[in-house]
Amino acid sequence: MKKSKYAYFLFPLLALVIFIPIYLNYDAHYDQHVAELAKKKDDEKQAQLAEQNRLRQKAVDDAVAETKRRAEEKRRKDEAEAKRVQEMQELGGTVSKVRSEREQLRDKVNRLSDSVKDAQAEVDKIKAQEARDKQEQTFIEQYVAKAQANVKNLNEVMQKIIEADAAAEAARAAAAKKS
């Protein structure tokens, strides 16, 4: 009969002695694991931002090259138009001159309209990307805050379990003394 009484105390006590080092080992490595995950996520985010910055820089460089190309094209057209106008003046065609100036201005307006549309499209793309980046950052911050709150709650629960086990152990010891 006495052996069975000891069994009720011995097995839970043995299980507790085995569980405590396992828990302490897990608890010691958990913070490091969470920090590694956060660092990995930050590294991925930084790589993604670097790639986006590279793509933006490429888009800017392409836009500058396109602007230079258009300027060169415009210069050539202007030179050709100037040569044509000079020839018309030599011929004395004022009506033709007015028509050519009108066409030149119309072409200039069309080119400028296209440039404005292209620039506006780039600005819209950049603003949309900024909005997505801000949303993602907000989500990550909220996620980290929730994870930290969960860790705190789990630690409180573990503390209560340990306190409850200690109280139960004290009650068992008191009951054992009475018996």
Image (cartoon, rainbow, N blue to C red):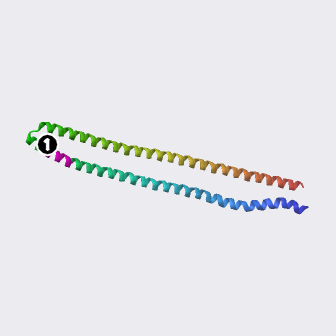
Q: Which residue is drawn at 55% across and 56% down?
A: 37
Indicate left or right for 149 with 170 as reference. Answer: left
Please tell me whether the stretch drawn in magenta is mainly helix, strand or loop. Answer: helix
Q: Which residue is drawn at 79% across and 59% down?
A: 12
Q: Which of 105 and 137 is in front in this view?
A: 105
Q: Which of 52 and 166 is in front in this view?
A: 52
x, y (%) of residue 95?
Answer: 14, 36
Indicate left or right for 87 with 139 as reference. Answer: left
Residue located beneath label 1 in the image? 85
**What span is colored magenta in the figure?**
75-83
Q: Which of 145 and 114 is in front in this view?
A: 114
Mark 1 closeness class: few <14, some 14–19, many ≥20 residues within 10 Å: many
The quadrant of the image that shows the N terminus is bottom right
Extreme-right residue of the structure: 1
Indicate left or right for 136 with 71 as reference. Answer: right
The question of residue 112 being in magenta is answered with no
Indicate left or right for 52 with 142 as reference. Answer: left
Count all numbered tags in the image, as a single digit: 1
Q: Nearer the viewer, residue 137 or 96?
A: 96
x, y (%) of residue 4?
Answer: 88, 61
Q: Residue at x 58, y 47 (%)?
A: 145
Using the rendered view, name the quadrant where residue 5 is placed. Answer: bottom right
- The type of residue carrying mark 1 is Val
x, y (%) of residue 76?
Answer: 20, 49
